[in-house]
Each structure stands twice: as C-alpha cells, then as structure tokens.
Amino acid sequence: MVDRATGRRVLILGGGAGGLELASQLAGRDGVEVTLVDREMTHLWKPRLHEFAAGTVSSTLAEISFYMLARMRGFHFEQGEVRAVDRTGGRVELAPMHDEEGRELAPARFLAYDLLVVALGGVTPDFGTEGVAENAVRLDRPEDAEDFRTRFAGVMIRARASGMPAEVVIVGSGATGTELAAHLRNSETGFLLRGGKAKAERLLGITILESADVIMPGIDDALRAKLVERLKDLDVKTVTDAKVAEIEPNAVRSVSGERWPADVAVWAAGLIGQPVLKRLADFELDDKGRIRVDRTLRATVDERIYVMGDAASMVPKGSEKPLPPTAQVASQQADYLAETIPLLLKGQPVEPFEYRDRGRLVQLGRAGTVGRIGSGHGDDFLIHGQFATAAYNALQRQHQWKVLGRLRGTVAIFADMLSPAKGPALKLHG
Ligand SMILES: Cc1cc2nc3c(=O)[nH]c(=O)nc-3n(C[C@H](O)[C@H](O)[C@H](O)COP(=O)(O)OP(=O)(O)OC[C@H]3O[C@@H](n4cnc5c(N)ncnc54)[C@H](O)[C@@H]3O)c2cc1C
C-alpha cells in the first residue's frame, strides 16, 4: 500500500516511447516527484530506428538528452542499467557504470520508490536460430541502427565501385522489415547519383523472407494487397513460407536448404520482453517474457508496481490476446498513467485502461504510406497517399508535443521538417 502521507516518489524505469511521455506529463502534477531511469544518455524514438539505419534521417538531430529534458520538464534523471527490483524494500538497484577502459564511473546505486513503473520495452528474439547473434543485425537499440548503417554503407560503396549489386536480406515481413526495405531503396538513389544524374542500374537487391504463407500476417487482405503492390513498385522481392534455419556470414539458409546470398542480413522477426524482466523480481510473465498486469496496468504480484508498453502483457476486456507491442499502445498507456498515478498516490480508485486502436500504417519511403485507420469500432477504412503519410507522421508529432511541450514541440517539428538531413536520400555519417 502506498503511504498516503509521504508517498509521492514515482520511479519510472525506461525512457522510451512510453516511459518518457509519462515522465514528461506526470512531473510536478499534484506534487508528484518523478525520477526517470535509462541506460542511455539520450532518447531516440524507436519507431524511427529503421530510418536512422537506412541513413534516410539523421539520428543526431532526432536525439534528445535525458539530462536536458529532465531540467526542462521538472523530473529527475538517473542514468544506469536497471539490475533488480527489491519489492519488499521498495527500491531498485542500478548496476555500476564503467567507462570504455573498464574504470568505474559510478558504483551500484539504490533508488527508493513509493510507486514504480516498469517501461523497459522489448527485444527481437532469435528463437534459437543459429548465427543470428553473430551474423545478423537486429534493430533493438540506437547502436544497432548505427551498426547497420555502417555495414550498409560499406557494401554499397563496394557495389558502386564494382558494379555488382549488394544484397540485403530481411527476415520478417512485419512493419520493421517492410519499412526498412522501402527506406533502403530510397538510400540506394544516393549511391546511384553520379555527376548529379542517377544511373539506371540497380546497386541493391532487397529480399524479405517470411515464415508464414503471407506477408505481414495479422493484417487484412485488402491492406496486404496494397502493401504487396507497393513493394513490387519498389522492386523488393518477397518470399513466403521461408523458414530460416541459419544466418551464415554471407547468406541466409532455410530449413529446406534454400540459400539467399546476403551482404547484410537483418533479423526483424517478432518481439519479446527485455531479458532483464525475468531477473528483475518474481513477476508473473507471459509466454513472451512480458510482465502480466491487470486492467489498470498494475503488476499481478505487487500493488505498488505498474508496467506499460512492450514490457507489459495486458489482456483487454473481451479479448484473449494481450495488446500488441506498439508505440500507439505505449503512448495511450502513458496518458492513462499520467492521469491515474496522482489518484493512486492518494489512495483513490481508478477506472481501467481502455485501448483505442487508431489503425495501422506502414510507411514505405517514396512509395508512400498505406494503412487502415479508424476508431477501432468497425468503422475503419483503407487509406494511402498524402493523407496516410500525414496520419503516420501524427504519431511522432504527438510524441514530440508530449515530451517537449506544445511550444518547444512545435519548434522541433518545424526544425525537423526544414532539416537538411531530411532532404538528401542518404546520410552516411554521424
Ligand atoms: C523499426 C521500428 C519501427 C516501429 N514502428 C512503429 C510504428 O510505426 N508505430 C508504432 O506504434 N510502433 C512502432 N514500433 C514499435 C514501438 O517502437 C514500440 O512498441 C515502442 O517503442 C514501445 O515503447 P516502450 O516505452 O515500451 O519501450 P521502448 O521505446 O523500447 O523504450 C524502452 C527504454 O528502456 C530502456 N532500457 C531498456 N533496458 C534497460 C535497462 N536494463 N536499464 C535501463 N534502461 C533500459 C531503453 O534504453 C529505452 O529507452 C516500431 C519499432 C521498431 C523497432
């Protein structure tokens, strides 16, 4: 039970799409003291990782310092790797921090809380597939995007010099895989330009492998048809029923023995909770390693702990499946917790969280955006073109407003639009 006389300390673990929106909206509300913890020094909005990976958008301009944001929005920021939650003592342990030479920068620390929010996100699982860790890139962290961009630039420079196209193979046809493919096609144009003129030849082969019998399983047929059409326009090859057995250093091999040459292989198949969630405390986890919560997002084992975003497994009323791991869900949960936490701290009852599915949009670079939007009550419709692109961008604009506030958020949005890094098809450096 939260101590109502003094219980104002809210500790948020993870400053991603959900945790940072919550910290920014909750800080100072009704005297709540917010501390945000993240292992990174800067926030980079995860739904754009594929754009940074493809080099079509500058990550340096999009990164926001947690230290500066904390000062601006009135919360405390503590940088460090979350190691354990001591539920009985009401405190969280952060691992010691070291520099690149292994010298200690900060010792292990303990942070006390009255109410804890776990927003540590998720990772792409390899399902025990051989060679994924060694030979494939997964887009889980900013350094993964950086790693991909470096490898991709290298193989494209070689392709340009030799005239032999580079091959990128993406395993998984979800939004991450398909959007990355489209942005890579955009990047290719930067390498084709010589003396200001684009040469006609292809310097890049892109293949998406999907283990199911259709691409992007889970979307409806009409939307899939639009997606397939756009991928064809982009000259992206898709292969279904491709069950991958191994990622080799220069190829992807299927269970049935087929091989696809790959200068760079990307593993973008599914999402599970951060591995640290298993070790944090004795939480109840679902089959994807996410913490089970009730409909107010409270952990099933502890009334002082709430979980949100990709780390949470919440089954909405009338459904059998947990909510999907999307920024849309994380953002709505941040709004909800920003409203309910002040009430919870006063010991007042709260209404359950209700998710409003605003639809699904896939941004395919110069082939535009396709998707389905609506209220989630059966009145949704298929969209594409300018309207779809505007709707896709809206999620990010809302994130910027919530994190930076209306005024600074608007300035950041204009700066983003006018940024020179937005212009060229490709960015090759930091
Ligand atoms: C390429 C790509 C494209 C996507 N596109 C879309 C889209 O178009 N629309 C959509 O709705 N969703 C999209 N998503 C999904 C969306 O990014 C996630 O669902 C969303 O980011 C989840 O938010 P979160 O706050 O739960 O976790 P995250 O945003 O992942 O944040 C987790 C935070 O926790 C920190 N952290 C993790 N472990 C530790 C630790 N041990 N100690 C300290 N800090 C830690 C991380 O540094 C990070 O800041 C996309 C995802 C990817 C990868």
Image: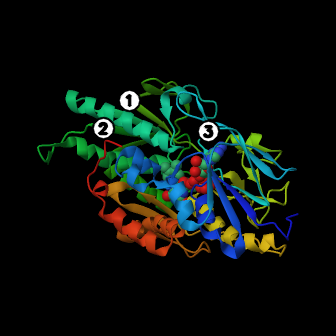
- Label 3 environment density (alpha carbons within 10 Å; few <14, some 14–19, many ≥20): some
User: How far apart in space, not on screen, are marks 3 and 2 (Cα)?
Assistant: 27 Å
User: How far apart in space, not on screen, are marks 3 and 1 (Cα)?
Assistant: 22 Å
* Rendered residue at 43%/51% (across/down): 179
* Rendered residue at 88%/50% (across/down): 88
- The foreground one among 365 and 69 is 69
Contact between marks 3 and 2 (CB within 8 A): the answer is: no
User: Could you tell which of marks 3 and 1 lies nearer the N-terminus?
Assistant: 3
Residue 402 image-quadrant placement: bottom right
- Label 1 environment density (alpha carbons within 10 Å; few <14, some 14–19, many ≥20): many
* Rendered residue at 21%/29% (across/down): 161
Q: Secondary structure at mark 1?
A: loop
Residue denoted by label 3: 125
Residue 421 x, y percent position in the rendering:
30, 54
Q: Amino acid at mark 3?
A: Pro
The image's mark for residue 204 is: 2
The way the protein has been coloured in the rendering is rainbow
Q: Is residue 59 left or right of residue 378?
A: left
- The foreground one among 14 and 284 is 14
In the rendered view, tell whether residue 417 sits above or below residue 101: below
Residue 113 x, y percent position in the rendering:
77, 57
User: How far apart in space, not on screen, are marks 1 and 2 (Cα)?
Assistant: 10 Å
Q: Amino acid at mark 1?
A: Asp
* Rendered residue at 88%/63% (across/down): 1
- The foreground one among 172 and 407 is 407
Residue 387 x, y percent position in the rendering:
39, 71
Residue denoted by label 1: 263
Residue 357 x, y percent position in the rendering:
60, 68
Q: Amino acid at mark 2?
A: Leu
Q: Is residue 340 left or right of residue 257?
A: right
